[in-house]
Image: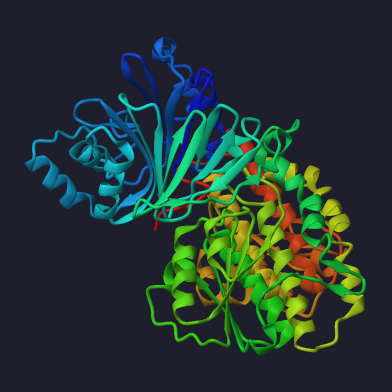
Amino acid sequence: MCGIIGYIGEKEVKPLLIEGLKRLEYRGYDSSGICVKNNSGLSIVKNVGKVEKLEKDARLSSIKGKVGIAHTRWATHGEPSELNAHPHYDCKNELAVVHNGIIENYVPLKKMLEKEGHKFKSQTDSEVIAHLLEKFYRGNLAEALLKVLPLLQGTYGLAVISKKNEEIVIAKKGSPLVLGIGNNKMLFASDQTALINYVPNIAYLNDNEIAILKENSFEIRNSNGKIIKPKIEALKLDAEDIEKNGFEHYMLKEIFEQPKSIKRALSGRLNKDGVKLSIDINLKKINRIVLLGCGTSWHSALIGKYLIEDLTNIPVEVDYASEFRYRTNPLKSSDLVIALSQSGETADTLAAIKKAKESKAKTIGLVNAVGSSIARECQSVIYLQAGPEIGVASTKAFTSQVTTLLLLALYIRKEKGMKLDKKLLKEILTLPKKVFSSLQTENKIKELADKFKDNKNFIFLGKGVNFPIALEGALKLKEISYIHAEGYPSAEMKHGPIALVDENMHCLFICTHDHTYDKVLSNIEEVKARKGKIIVITDKADDKLTSKADEIIYVPHIDPILAPLINIIPLQLFAYHVANMKGLDVDKPRNLAKSVTVE
């Protein structure tokens, strides 16, 4: 949650900060603000709403300078308002802070500071950082910050500037920060996408480190003040990766990128003879697997359970990462814990991995963001290679997660000495082409979206490996169209949800021709008998279905174990077109953020 960016260099900072905030806006868009240092001191402009509102603020015209920090907010403490927006001043307006994370002990800190005479303007936890810095600041910003950080309980990616210092000082614990290293300029941001076209090289800040950024140099120190030598690497993204390329929204672009993103996930890892992954763990000794995720990643994990158990015979558990650390989890060294996260920064998942490591369990991260916290925390990492995903509602990262879990299941099968099914390997290689074919349902989906966009409720139903697809389809509709939707295993319908069924309830069934087909068909009959409206996704024309369904969407037939990757496509398109026809902001749905870096 929240995005921060800063610059120190030779050029006017304001345009760069605004552009950087736009690239980070997927992390939060309740409010935004910038602080620029100039000869007269620090100037802050803040606004409620999206960055475009800040960009048009007339107050910005009078602000000029070559050093600045900026913030786009997802509210945790305090409602979205100009006072609660970042950056925050100290009492004297000599220091300014931007912060991503949560300061859990801000209440006692605030009471202490108020007793000392500090005056607070906001309801946020973040403002205490500015006042603590004021308390310790004696001309050296880095020394003051090193005294403040031990007092903070919680997480932070933060930056501070002073009207007296030609530098920016940043610090990290639990929230991502990446440095951008250029000629006569230094930048930092919550995500490397904000640095594209500005710098050739980057370096990641680790937990409990600070960095001092100057125009021509930077220095990283640990919590004891000792200088740390960072790993500097090339910034490999380019502007095309974060452009819409003619699509109306990022989400639609990312839906249509899935043939390519799945192909990238397979590339170099699978051919007709087998699977190849670089994993620094002896998987032959693994007796149990635990999959962790939140939201869409949890749905990917549920599919992973079906894939891994089917292909390896190893028992698999799936847990919400947000719940995993709050119950007793008797893990062993023979257990493998797999963490799924698009951003690689999901706070709940990161905390769960740290707990798993305490039990000596093996850990693998399945993440999209290279160099992210989860990637560095796990013993081994498999990158999704989906490319940047800007739309808040995940699409291509979901299918890349499922594809990567499939590869991992095949790899474990091979490591266990089990024979690989050459026919299945060949079928997997057809996935990009068949996903492309599934995208051709768009015209039919548009018709259905127009027909059902004013509905208030939907039930999504699937069985076996398609049950998680029902969950994911319902989640997508909820996330971006704000229509109430629920996903269930189709047989669970009669254990409660069937009470909702009448002539106004639309039930969307995933009914492809596998070993569950007859059972799902019976569940359709049960809804039909109660006058419910039926929409079906299927892979073959079938008189039994056409006689019962009000609407049918046809997708390509594929091996049943791979069907989720095909069947999710029309559900993603349905959610997108319903939301778009309702005139909603598809890429930035209300109350959501892309990277959930707070618990």
Residue 274 picture location, percent across and down: 87, 74
Question: How is the rendered protein coloured?
Answer: rainbow
Above or below, 255 against 5 in this view is below
- Residue at x-position 34% and y-position 51%: 102
Residue 44 picture location, percent across and down: 35, 23
Q: Is residue 506 visible?
A: no
Q: Please state which of residues 224 and 554 is positioned toward the viewer in this rendering.
A: 224
Q: Toward which corner of the image does residue 327 lie, by quadrant?
A: bottom left
Q: Toward which corner of the image does residue 553 lie, by quadrant?
A: bottom right
Looking at the image, residue 432 sits to the left or right of residue 118; the answer is right
Looking at the image, residue 539 sits to the left or right of residue 184; the answer is right
Locate the C terminus and report the quarter of the image it occupies.
bottom left
Q: Toward which corner of the image does residue 183 lie, by quadrant?
A: top right
Q: Please state which of residues 468 and 188 is positioned toward the viewer in this rendering.
A: 188
Q: Is residue 204 visible?
A: yes
Residue 396 picture location, percent across and down: 70, 52
Above or below, 222 against 348 in this view is above
Above or below, 164 against 577 in this view is above
Q: How many marks?
A: 0
Residue 66 picture location, percent across and down: 46, 20
Q: Please state which of residues 217 and 241 is positioned toward the viewer in this rendering.
A: 217
Looking at the image, residue 89 sits to the left or right of residue 437; the answer is left
Looking at the image, residue 38 sits to the left or right of residue 236; the answer is left
Q: Please state which of residues 138 and 61 is positioned toward the viewer in this rendering.
A: 138
